[in-house]
Image (tube, helix red, strand yellow):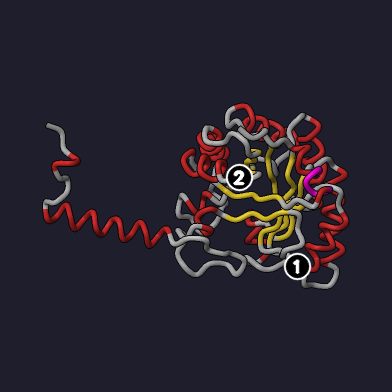
Amino acid sequence: MMNKLRTTDFRKMKEQGEKIAMITAYDATIAAIVDAAGVDVVLVGDSLGNVVQGLEDTLSVTLDEMIYHTKIVSRGVDRAHLCSDMPFLSYQKSPEDAIESAGRLLKEGRAESVKLEVNDAYIDTVYRIQKAGIPVVAHIGLCPQSVHVMGGYKVQGSLPGDRETLLDLAKSCEQAGAFMVLIESVLSEVARDVTESLGIPTVGIGSGVDCDGQVLVVNDMIGLTPEPLPKFVKKYAKVAETISDSAKKYVEEVKKGTFPSQEQSYG
């Protein structure tokens, strides 16, 4: 068995130029598969609202739901670091609420770190959570929990002053004690500048090749998500087609009475 990855390992990976591979998982089966495949970080994303629950956004996902999914994912993870999203309104009300929510994700969900979407208002929250002994990934750029404020899912970093704002925000997250920054849907050159400005690693999604690592939603990556997909997604398989073909064959054999055969029967 390979050594368990810890938060301190990721800074070493950045220093050594080794890219970080992160992928989402929402259940123990997928978690075990991607962990065995060599993924460095398994993220239990609040994207489960879209992927698992069929919602249009992530805003309805509850803390109890995140704890449940994190707990079952933890049973499939041996080597990878396990990070869990803090859902909408689990940290926005006060740093005290944030610490309690993050603590539940570790105590009940068995997460090893938490991720929260950060703007200037939550720098102190990042500081307070990590001071409580809970490692923090700071999520900047496109923040899905703020979709209504941002006016939709738009690429970030193109407006005057955006580069400086994101640079300042990322540096503040590092100073507050975050061990990693996730950069979502930010112009490649801006994400590169952020990455180069930090001593802690960055993981990008839709933010170009120059981040210290990458993350994809597993359903997008394996071809389970219906089209259209975001520009930044690469499909490495066509699992939806495999499931559909298998289901059609199963239905056909049941209707014909050829399944189950003697081979699948007892006696």
**Front disc: 1 or 2:** 2
Crowding around mark 1 (Cα neighbors within 10 Å: few <14, some 14 to 19, many 20+) is some
243 magenta-colored: no
For label 1, the SS is helix
Decide if residue 105 is in sight here.
yes
In the image, the segment drawn in magenta is: 11-15
Vertical placement of residue 177 versus 244, above or below: above
Q: Nearer the viewer, residue 36 or 138?
A: 36
Point 74% across, 37% down: residue: 7
Q: Quadrant of residue 191?
A: bottom right
Q: Nearer the viewer, residue 250 or 265?
A: 265
Type of amino acid at the residue the image marks with label 2: Gly
Q: Position of residue 247 (x, y in %)?
A: 28, 56
Taking 102 as reference, is 76 left or right? left
Query: What is the quadrant of the N terminus in the image?
Result: top right
**Whole-Å distance between the Cαs marked 1 and 2?**
26 Å
For label 2, the SS is loop
Dot label at residue 38: 2
Taking 210 as reference, is 24 left or right? left
Type of amino acid at the residue the image marks with label 1: Ser
Q: Position of residue 106 (x, y in %)?
A: 64, 31
Decide if residue 64 is in sight here.
no
Point 62% across, 41% down: residue: 84
Counting labels gives: 2
Dot label at residue 188: 1
Q: Nearer the viewer, residue 42 or 164?
A: 42
Q: Position of residue 40 (x, y in %)?
A: 65, 44
Taking 13 as reference, is 111 left or right? left
Vertical placement of residue 96 versus 53, above or below: above
Crowding around mark 2 (Cα neighbors within 10 Å: few <14, some 14 to 19, many 20+) is few
Vertical placement of residue 24 versus 6, above or below: below
